[in-house]
Amino acid sequence: MNNKFTLFCTAIGAAVCLMHAIGHDSEPVYILFYCLSVPAWFYPIFGYTNVNPAILYVLTILSWTVIGYVIDRFSVRRRSRS
């Protein structure tokens, strides 16, 4: 199976986390991170002080990896039907 989308989406997740870790003082970086990070959507449920940022970064990268894997699986299934 070609893992093109899995690698691409993992790179997107890592880039979003790296931008957030480096640009902590910029408001647009915060908005971009919280729009593109699926685990960050659930961040307010646990409170703003109880969640470790490292765990949030790992979960963000893992969620983007899973999204890419699902896209790869659907593309393989679609190509096999044709």
Image (spheres, grey):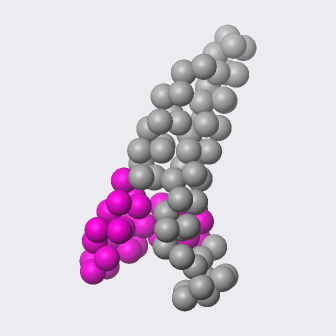
The residue at 53%/27% (across/down) is 3
The residue at 42%/67% (across/down) is 33
Q: Nearer the viewer, residue 5 or 81?
A: 5
Q: Indicate left or right for 81 with 17 as reference.
A: right
Q: Position of residue 7 (x, y in %)?
A: 47, 36
The residue at 72%/14% (across/down) is 81
Q: Nearer the viewer, residue 23 or 53?
A: 53
Point out the stretch of residues depicted in magenta.
15-41
In the rendered picture of this protein, how many numbered marks are placed on residues? 0
Q: Nearer the viewer, residue 34 or 63?
A: 63
Q: Indicate left or right for 5 with 79 as reference.
A: left
Picture layout, residue 21 above or below residue 27: above
The residue at 54%/21% (across/down) is 2
Residue 9 seen in the current view = yes
In the rendered structure, does residue 57 fall within the stretch colored magenta? Answer: no
User: Which image quadrant is residue 72 in?
Assistant: top right
